[in-house]
Each structure stands twice: as structure tokens, then as C-alpha cells.
Image (spheres, helix red, strand yellow):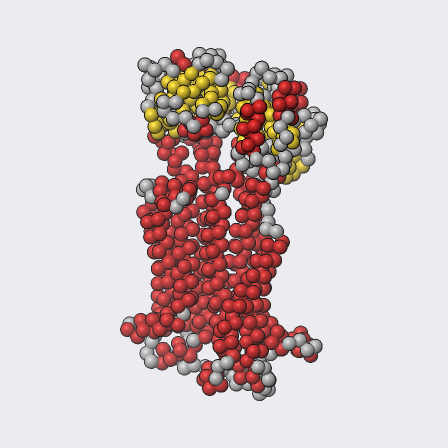
């Protein structure tokens, strides 16, 4: 054991850089996987916690006041009901901000579906005008307990008693009104009611909705909200961040395992004589295997422990969403298990790849095999084997011999060359995927119109303004390029199991600029475009006809295109306002989608339009989903750094192997008249050729793989394929050039040292 430790210590002193890089790479990989686990927990558990603590309903049905919802309590599979509660749709203002809300008449004592208070207190009968706000609505209104809300168009005011979290869909200024829980006496003009159904089997949600629609009638139900929709919306971008981190973490782990395997294999080939000496002095094959295995397990273990320690000690102090995610994750019961299991799994994977390479060291014979002194009829050995016909022709055409021999050394042994190229290409491929993710997010910010967000503002007007006055107000702003009247309503899908968003934007004379990934825009009567989420929900394709109902009024539309929809999980179908009005005269424009001129600031434009309207215009900026993906840029930078470390380890391995294998060719190269500078150029050229082949392979495979992965994520989220954007060709060219130049620069020093070795050292190496 003492001899084993001394040999391992000596080897560590000789290869300090390799050990450092392997440890750092392992730390980065384990850190990525731990962050991915934390983000998955952060995405799921906050909503799940609220749902369980509030005993939330699996289905919320918004119905007409006349609907006899009491029958729903007796349906099979319904465990309990929340409500029914009378509702009033209105608009409130606070601190100069307005929001569409749903006043919900809620008793003081609620058995099921009661919100979870985060500040203030619950409803009090002694305060008939006291209300509780949903947390996202309170954030939008900048409202806190004690503040006063004003109902737009009236002299009525409400006092905020508390702020609460709910398991229902959260407030969205463009899609979802905010929830305001109020005493029944505060709901003066109810225009609907809502009831929640808690089911014995949550998987039967669709069936329960169908039964409810059958009992009440399709015309009685205005909107259906299920627990799956609320959970998916609450998870939002955090789950995507976790998936990206997990994907890159696993990819980096595979790349690191291959890098370790290649490093050990190359070192074994370069230390055959040392291994033979170890066996000659009494080392068993098992001891030799353990030397290599324990060394690299120690490197991996050190990196994994470092990552786990950093995550435990500093993770919650990270800024933004990552810090919040780790702080929440550390409070979960599964945290301790994951904190130990993930590093252990990473170390075991690296140990498995190490064991396969170390096993070869145990098979080295105790007597070193003499290297052949001649090749091919007693002539001097040639680097890498016999020159190929193209190489000989290149020499005959006076191509510099260093270039010809370097290319020959890089690709003479096909199996070994292809393995080296593949190992180096994997981290480069993953870097190209990370660059593509960065470019796609940047495109969301710079060109929102191409990913389904042509409008920057949404404008709602008071009832006293007609279309001509509103258009005149908008046209007077110098930064407004166009305004499209529209309406958005909830519609029941065929089968009556869920509601979707039915939109009518623009007119046939002034069509709305949809971002299409497939098909064509709607031009004629009854033509529409749909998001990927709706196509998946209804199991239809472009070219099909779909039927939906708004109240009792059917809408039959022909899907002529697939639009990129970033909202409502892609469960959106859009047509012109003219088409909706023709099918249902009651559907008229209630809002305006405003497109700004290039370079205009949406926030400044919203403030100007609000001031110009003298309080008669409610202006909101359209939320860009890329705002929630901003942390992904930092993730991409960290991933690229980890992959660069792994690539550097693989590159150092390739350089070391080329230098060691070139030692026995040194005499032959000097015998044919090559100078030390030319011999150095042979090694540099071989390294450059290997890196160039890896860069070309990584780029050629990484670009289409990135498109496929990003579009697959788009399809699964409902946005749809067509959002992927690859890095500019100039950036890919710069990336490949930097990789090749960096590799050649890194190989220059060891190649120069090997070329200037004394002849006696060279003879001992090949003896």
C-alpha cells in the first residue's frame, strides 16, 4: 500500500493540471445537476404546497347565475365542493394602476379552497368593504394590507385586509382577471357564480367536467379551470430551466466520463514501461488497476464534495430565481437524499468509465514488449505508420513535410483517431447547443414579432369611448405603428372537457400580423390559425375544421395555419374580428393590440397613452416570455465554462498522447533531415487537424440537434416548433477557429520540449 501511495503521489505531482481540470469539471457537472434538481422542486412544490394546504379544488366552473350548480355535489367522483360563490367582473385601481378583477362573494369560514394568507388577515364581517387580494394581483397593483382600491367608474372603495396565495390560475393582465375575495355584502351586482369540485381521483378531471356540462348544459358554463392548467402555469419557466440544466448536466457527465476514459487510456499507452516495472517489482494486476481507479475516483470525489458543499453553503445566497429555488429546495424532506445521491451517482459513473480503461493497465505484461526497430524492409520507422498515397503525392508536390506528416500522424490510426475526434467533439457539440439556446432567447428579446408577440401594448378603453375616438388617441402617439381591435373569450372545446382562448384580432382589411410556423394567415370567412397546444388538445392538424361554443353560440372555424403562441400553453385559436362578429353579433371589440415602431420603449409608450387618455385608457405592456428565461443566459455561460473545462482535459490528453507517441518517431524525423522546429510543427499540425475535425463534427451535429431539442421543448410547452434559432455562421466560424488556434497554441510548448530532447533520452524511450 505504501508503494502504491508513493507512486500515486508521484503521478499526481507530474500531472497536477490534469487532476485540477478533472476535479473542476466534476464540480461543475455535479453543481449543474444539483441546480436542476432544485429548480424542478421549485417549479412543482410551491403550487403543490398551496394546493394541499388549502385543500384546493381540482376543477373550477364559472357559470351563469341561473345555473343549478347544487346538483354537482352529487356527481360520482366528487368528494366535496367549494361554493358556489357569486362573482362580479369589474376593474379596480390602486396607485395609478388598474386591473380587471373578479370579486368573489366569500363567507368568513371556508372549508375547501380557502386561500393561504401571506400577509394581513382574512375577511371580517365587521368590515363589509374589506377584501383579500391574490398575491400576483396585489403585486401588479402595488397594494398591501391597509391600502384602498377604487372600483373604476364608481365612487365605491374597498380596503385591502390581506394578501393570499391561491392554487387557481394567477392574474395575467392580458388573459386572466385577478381574484378578490370579498364579503357577500361587497358584491353588489353579481353577474355569475363559481363552484369548485374536489375529486376523489384527480386523473378523472376530464370526465368530471363532461358530467358537469351534461348536468348544467353547455350554455350555462362560461369557463373551466383545471388543476393541471393551474399547475403548469405556476411552474412556468422554472421547469424549463431545470430541464435545460439537467440536460446539459447529463451531457457534461457523459463527456467527462469519456474524457477520463481517454485520459487513462492515453496514459497507459504512454507508461507501458512504467507499468511493466511495477509488475516486475511485485505489483499484481489488481493493484495496478486500483492505482489508476482510486486516483481518478479521488479527483471525482473531491469535485463532487466541493459542488455539494458550495450548494449547501452558498446556494441560497445566489441572486434571483436560483437562490430562491435552492432556499426552498433545502427545506424539502427529499433535499438531503438528493444532495448525497446526485454526487454519488456522478462519482460512480466516472468510476465505471475509469474501471474499463484501468482494466487495460492490469493486462500489461511484466516484461515490456520491444518496439519494432524497422518497418517495411528494414527502413527507418515512419511516424504513425506507412505513408498513404495522398501523403506521398503531397510530399512530391513540395507541400511542407511538417504539414503532411502532422496530418498523417493525426489520422493514420483510424480507430484511435476517430475515438479522439469523437471525445473532443462531444463537449464542442454541447457548447453549440448552449449557444443556440442563448441565440433563441436573444431572438425572443430582439424580435418578439417573429415569436408570436407583434403587439407591445394591450389597450382597454372605457365604455364611453367609441372606436373612432380610441383610434384617434392611439394614432396621435408618434411611436404607435398600428392598432388592431380585438376580443378574447373563453370557449368550450368539443367534448366539453376544457376551455380555450378564442381570439378575434384585426379585420380582413387590416389583418393582424400572426407569426406563422405552418400554413398561411386567415384571409377568408371562418378561417383561423391555432397554437400547438390547441392542436394537441383537440388532436387536429392544419386543414381541419373545429367546432367550439361560446355560451350557447357555436363557432365553426377552418384552421389554415399554425401560429406561434406563447400564452395559455398554446391553447389558442385566432381569427379576424369580422369572422367572430358574423358568427355571433354580440362579440365586438373590447381591446386593442398596439404595435410600436422599431426601437420604441413599451413602458414609456404605455405611460404616454395613459396620460393622453385622461384615465379613460387602461394600457398594459405585453409580457415577453423571454423575461422569465433571462436566468437561462447565466446557465448557458456556466454550462459553456464546464464544457470548456472538459474539452480542455480531452485536449491535454490528445496532446500528451501525440507527444508521447511521437517520441519513438523522433529519431526517424531527425534522420530524414527535419529540424526541431519542423518536428514541433508536426505535433502542432496533428493537434490542429484533430481539433479541426472535432470542431467540424461538433458544429455539424450540434446545430441540427439544438434545433430539434429547442423545437421539441416548444412543442411540449404548447408554443410549437419553429422558435429555434441557431448561432450566426460568423459566430460558429469564430468558435471553430478559436478552438483550433487554442489547441495549436496549447500544444506548442510540450511539442517544442519533445523535439529538443537528447538522443540518449529518445533511445531509452524506444528501447
Residue 575's image quarter?
A: top right
Q: Is residue 497 left or right of residue 84?
A: right
Work out whether residue 492 can be spotted: no
Residue 458 image point, x, y percent: 57, 28
Residue 77's image quarter?
A: top left
Residue 550 image point, x, y percent: 57, 21
Identity of the residue drawn at 32% across and 14% down: 126
Identity of the residue drawn at 60% across and 72% down: 407
Residue 511's image quarter?
A: top right
Residue 512 image point, x, y percent: 65, 30
Q: Is residue 127 left or right of residue 609?
A: left
User: Which residue is farthest bottom?
Assistant: 378
Residue 310 image point, x, y percent: 35, 52
Identity of the residue drawn at 33% across and 25% down: 120
Q: Is residue 361 above or below residue 83?
A: below
Residue in front for this viewpoint, 435 or 347 = 435
Q: Quadrant of the N terminus?
A: bottom left
Amino acid at each position: 500500500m505504501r508503494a502504491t501511495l508513493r507512486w500515486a503521489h508521484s503521478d499526481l505531482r507530474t500531472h497536477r493540471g490534469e487532476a485540477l481540470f478533472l476535479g473542476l469539471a466534476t464540480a461543475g457537472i455535479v453543481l449543474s445537476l444539483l441546480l436542476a434538481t432544485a429548480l424542478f422542486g421549485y417549479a412543482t412544490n410551491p403550487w403543490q404546497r398551496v394546493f394541499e394546504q388549502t385543500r384546493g379544488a381540482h376543477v373550477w366552473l364559472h357559470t351563469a347565475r341561473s345555473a343549478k350548480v347544487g346538483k354537482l355535489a352529487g356527481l360520482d367522483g366528487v368528494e366535496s365542493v367549494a361554493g358556489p360563490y357569486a362573482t362580479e367582473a369589474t376593474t379596480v385601481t390602486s396607485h395609478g394602476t388598474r386591473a380587471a378583477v373578479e370579486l368573489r362573494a366569500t363567507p368568513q369560514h371556508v372549508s375547501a379552497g380557502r386561500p393561504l394568507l401571506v400577509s394581513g388577515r382574512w375577511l371580517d364581517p365587521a368590515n363589509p368593504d374589506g377584501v383579500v387580494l391574490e398575491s400576483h394581483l396585489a403585486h401588479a397593483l402595488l397594494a398591501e394590507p391597509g391600502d384602498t382600491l377604487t372600483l373604476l367608474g364608481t365612487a365605491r372603495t374597498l380596503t385591502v385586509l390581506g394578501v393570499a396565495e391561491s392554487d387557481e390560475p394567477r392574474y395575467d393582465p392580458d388573459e386572466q382577471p385577478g381574484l378578490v375575495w370579498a364579503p357577500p355584502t361587497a358584491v353588489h351586482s353579481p353577474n355569475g357564480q363559481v363552484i369548485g369540485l374536489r375529486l376523489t381521483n384527480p386523473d378523472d378531471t376530464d370526465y368530471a367536467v363532461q358530467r358537469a356540462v351534461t348536468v348544467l348544459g353547455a350554455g350555462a358554463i362560461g369557463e373551466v379551470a383545471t388543476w393541471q392548467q393551474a399547475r403548469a402555469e405556476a411552474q412556468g419557466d422554472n421547469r424549463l430551466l431545470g430541464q435545460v440544466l439537467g440536460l446539459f448536466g447529463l451531457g457534461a457527465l457523459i463527456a467527462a466520463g469519456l474524457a477520463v476514459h481517454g485520459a487513462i487510456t492515453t496514459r497507459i499507452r504512454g507508461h507501458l514501461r512504467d507499468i511493466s516495472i511495477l509488475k516486475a517489482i511485485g505489483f499484481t494486476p489488481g493493484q495496478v488497476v486500483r492505482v489508476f481507479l482510486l486516483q481518478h475516483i479521488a479527483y471525482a470525489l473531491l469535485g463532487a464534495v466541493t459542488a455539494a458543499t458550495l450548494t449547501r453553503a452558498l446556494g441560497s445566497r445566489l441572486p434571483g430565481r436560483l437562490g430562491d429555488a435552492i432556499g426552498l429546495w433545502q427545506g424539502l424532506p427529499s433535499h438531503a437524499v438528493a444532495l448525497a445521491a446526485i454526487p454519488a451517482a456522478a462519482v460512480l459513473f466516472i468510476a465505471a468509465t475509469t474501471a474499463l480503461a484501468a482494466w487495460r493497465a492490469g493486462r500489461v505484461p511484466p516484461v515490456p514488449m520491444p518496439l519494432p526497430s524497422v518497418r517495411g524492409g528494414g527502413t527507418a520507422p515512419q511516424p504513425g505508420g506507412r505513408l498513404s498515397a495522398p501523403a506521398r503525392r503531397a510530399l512530391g508536390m513540395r507541400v511542407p513535410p511538417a504539414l503532411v506528416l502532422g496530418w498523417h500522424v493525426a489520422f493514420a490510426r483510424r480507430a484511435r483517431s476517430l475515438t479522439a475526434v469523437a471525445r473532443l467533439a462531444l463537449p464542442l457539440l454541447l457548447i453549440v447547443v448552449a449557444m443556440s439556446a442563448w441565440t433563441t432567447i436573444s431572438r425572443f428579446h430582439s424580435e418578439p414579432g417573429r415569436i408570436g408577440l407583434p403587439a407591445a401594448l394591450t389597450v382597454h378603453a372605457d365604455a364611453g369611448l367609441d372606436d373612432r375616438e380610441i383610434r384617434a388617441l392611439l394614432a396621435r402617439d408618434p411611436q404607435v405603428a398600428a392598432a388592431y381591435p380585438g376580443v378574447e373569450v373563453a370557449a368550450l372545446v368539443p367534448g366539453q372537457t376544457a376551455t380555450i382562448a378564442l381570439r378575434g384580432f384585426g379585420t380582413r382589411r387590416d389583418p393582424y400580423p400572426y407569426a406563422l410556423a405552418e400554413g398561411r394567415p386567415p384571409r377568408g370567412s371562418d378561417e383561423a390559425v391555432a397554437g400547438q397546444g390547441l392542436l394537441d388538445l383537440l388532436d387536429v392538424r392544419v386543414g381541419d375544421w373545429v367546432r367550439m361554443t361560446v355560451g350557447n353560440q357555436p363557432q365553426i372555424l377552418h384552421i389554415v395555419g399554425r401560429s406561434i403562441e406563447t400564452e395559455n400553453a398554446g391553447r389558442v385559436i385566432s381569427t379576424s374580428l369580422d369572422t367572430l362578429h358574423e358568427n355571433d353579433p354580440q362579440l365586438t371589440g373590447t381591446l386593442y393590440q398596439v404595435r410600436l415602431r422599431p426601437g420604441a420603449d413599451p413602458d414609456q409608450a404605455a405611460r404616454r397613452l395613459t396620460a393622453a387618455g385622461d384615465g379613460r385608457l387602461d394600457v398594459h405592456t405585453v409580457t415577453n416570455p423571454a423575461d422569465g428565461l433571462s436566468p437561462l443566459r447565466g446557465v448557458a455561460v456556466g454550462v459553456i465554462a464546464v464544457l470548456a473545462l472538459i474539452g480542455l482535459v480531452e485536449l491535454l490528453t490528445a496532446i500528451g498522447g501525440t507527444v508521447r507517441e511521437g517520441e519513438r518517431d523522433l529519431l526517424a524525423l531527425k534522420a530524414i533531415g527535419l529540424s526541431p522546429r519542423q518536428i514541433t510543427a508536426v505535433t502542432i499540425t496533428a493537434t490542429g487537424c484533430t481539433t479541426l475535425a472535432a470542431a467540424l463534427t461538433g458544429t455539424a451535429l450540434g446545430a441540427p440537434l439544438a434545433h430539434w431539442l429547442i423545437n421539441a421543448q416548444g412543442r411540449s410547452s404548447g408554443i410549437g416548433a419553429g422558435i429555434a434559432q441557431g448561432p450566426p455562421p460568423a459566430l460558429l466560424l469564430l468558435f471553430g477557429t478559436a478552438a483550433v488556434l487554442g489547441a495549436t497554441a496549447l500544444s506548442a510548448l510540450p511539442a517544442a520540449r519533445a523535439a529538443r530532447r537528447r538522443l540518449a533520452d529518445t533511445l531509452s524511450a524506444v528501447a
